[in-house]
């Protein structure tokens, strides 16, 4: 069975990385959903993809230079606010598995602290990043956490690294995936979750290749 993984909630249906989008992923029956996190100026871990707020809100400025109050004053789409990681964990507990992508600098330690005290089981959580240094930093804090290694250029290099750190999965840009990659990576004991697969033809191709899960803005198409 191919796992259905909602990208930033169900970003094709609702404003990305909002509670509305994440609840949509649950409603659509996703197995997992993915979010992105940064640390804001007042120290909280907030759920937003970009370093700046202008693309996903009506505001301007860097997340790292804005307080939680300032971020909460912004409209993240359809009247939604930028949620904290704690708010997401509270809203989704027991309903879906959660993939936390470390985006902003300095996220491993505070994210670890929050996840450790969340009451979530390790089997329901995963931490991923394109920044492999941050993944190693997280693993030093919690060697038991499921780790996902993201790749947007060299899938084989990512798989070699994932095997070295005993990661759970390697998650390449879907255009990088070939059948030989699937075969060799599965032999290493790694799962493969390509991103961001939104077109029906691409979804069908990933399924034919034998990936373990698909990350999509439209998880209902998987």
Image (cartoon, helix red, strand yellow):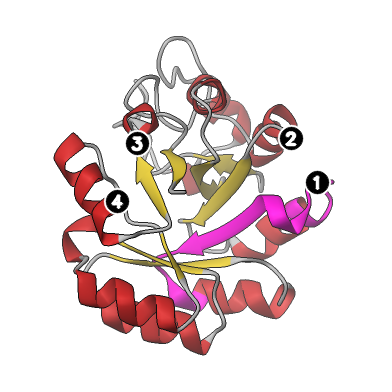
In the image, is 91 to the left or to the right of 34?
right
* Residue underneath mark 2: 93
Per the rendered image, the range of residues in magenta is: 115-133
What is the CA distance from the residue labelled 3 to the residue labelled 2? 23 Å
* Inter-mark Cα distance, 1 to 3: 30 Å
Residue 32 location in percent, x, y? 54, 42
Specify whether residue 86 is painted magenta: no
Q: Nearer the viewer, mark 1 or mark 3?
A: 3
Q: Earlier in the sequence, mark 4 or mark 1?
A: 1
Label 3: which residue? 222
State yes or no: discs 4 and 1 in contact (Cβ < 8 Å). no
Front one among 187 and 36: 187
For marks 3 and 2, the one nearer the N-term is 2
Residue 216 placement: quadrant: top left
Q: Is label 1 in contact with label 2 (beta carbons under 8 Å)?
A: yes
Q: Which part of the image, by quadrant, shows the C terminus?
A: top left
Q: Give the mark nearest the N terminus, 1 or 3.
A: 1
């Amino acid at each position: 069975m191919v796992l259905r993984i909602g990208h930033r909630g169900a970003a094709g249906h609702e404003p990305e990385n909002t509670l509305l989008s994440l609840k949509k992923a649950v409603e659509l029956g996703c197995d997992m959903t993915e979010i992105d996190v940064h640390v804001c100026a007042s120290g909280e871990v907030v759920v937003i993809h970009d370093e700046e707020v202008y693309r996903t809100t009506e505001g301007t400025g860097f997340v790292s230079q804005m307080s939680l109050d300032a971020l909460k004053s912004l409209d993240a789409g359809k009247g939604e606010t930028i949620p904290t990681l704690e708010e997401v964990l509270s809203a989704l507990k027991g309903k879906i598995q959660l993939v936390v992508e470390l985006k902003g600098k300095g996220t491993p330690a505070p994210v670890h602290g929050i996840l450790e005290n969340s009451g979530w089981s390790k089997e329901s959580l995963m931490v991923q990043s394109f920044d492999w240094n941050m993944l190693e930093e997280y693993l030093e804090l919690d060697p038991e956490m499921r780790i996902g290694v993201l790749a947007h250029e060299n899938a084989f290099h990512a798989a070699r690294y994932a095997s070295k750190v005993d990661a759970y999965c390697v998650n390449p840009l879907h255009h990088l995936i070939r059948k030989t990659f699937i075969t060799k990576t599965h032999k290493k004991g790694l799962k493969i979750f390509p991103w961001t697969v939104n077109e029906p033809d691409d979804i069908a191709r990933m399924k034919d290749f034998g990936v373990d899960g698909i990350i999509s803005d439209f998880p209902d198409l998987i």
